[in-house]
Image: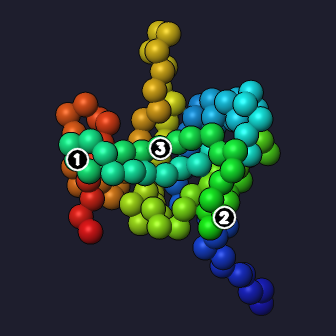
Amino acid sequence: MTVETYNPNTIIPVSFTPKAVKHLASQVEKKKAKGIEFNIKESGCSGFKYLLELAFDPAEDALVYQLNEQLNLFISPKVMPLIKGTQVDYIQEGVNFRLEFTNPNATAHCGCGESFSVEQ
């Protein structure tokens, strides 16, 4: 009989499509950042806005997840309940691109897609 150890800090709480990982990894490499910080802030008509920013000096309490060999993801524990289960995709249409967030915790979105709300 074998025993497996479960460590919740090793399971990535959000997912990224391969296109999103490739795009973000290239940005991190170009700017020589430590990775990407996934955060939210109060904003917009629905309450919260997603922030994916280059992490040059990530918060000390940030949880660190390795998305691939080149890309680390930093997430603050306080935003985890709001983003857990979110999928991030990279969408390119012609010369335009955007990151698209699909969050199972969101109860509403604003019309322009910039912000979301959750029941707390």
Kind of residue indicated by mark 1: Ser
Look at the numbered disc 1 and give the secondary structure of its residue: loop
Look at the numbered disc 2 and give the secondary structure of its residue: loop
Q: Earlier in the sequence, mark 2 or mark 3?
A: 3
Query: Does residue 23 show up?
Result: yes
Q: Quadrant of residue 56?
A: top right
As drawn, the residue found furthest toward the bottom would be: 1
Which residue does the numbered mark 1 point to in the structure image? Answer: 46
The x, y position of residue 28, in whole percent, is 70, 35
**Eye-nearest disc, 1 or 2:** 2
Which residue does the numbered mark 2 point to in the structure image? Answer: 60
Q: Earlier in the sequence, mark 1 or mark 3?
A: 1
Kind of residue indicated by mark 3: Leu
Side of 15 where 111 appears, left or right: left
Spatial distance from mark 1 to mark 2, Cα to Cα? Answer: 29 Å
Seen from the viewer's position, the closer of residues 51 and 15 is: 51
Kind of residue indicated by mark 2: Glu
**Eye-nearest disc, 2 or 3:** 2
Look at the numbered disc 3 and give the secondary structure of its residue: strand
Spatial distance from mark 2 to mark 3, Cα to Cα? Answer: 18 Å
The answer to whether the residue labelled 1 contacts the one labelled 3, judged by CB atoms less than 8 Å apart, is no
Which residue does the numbered mark 3 point to in the structure image? Answer: 51
The x, y position of residue 79, in whole percent, is 45, 62
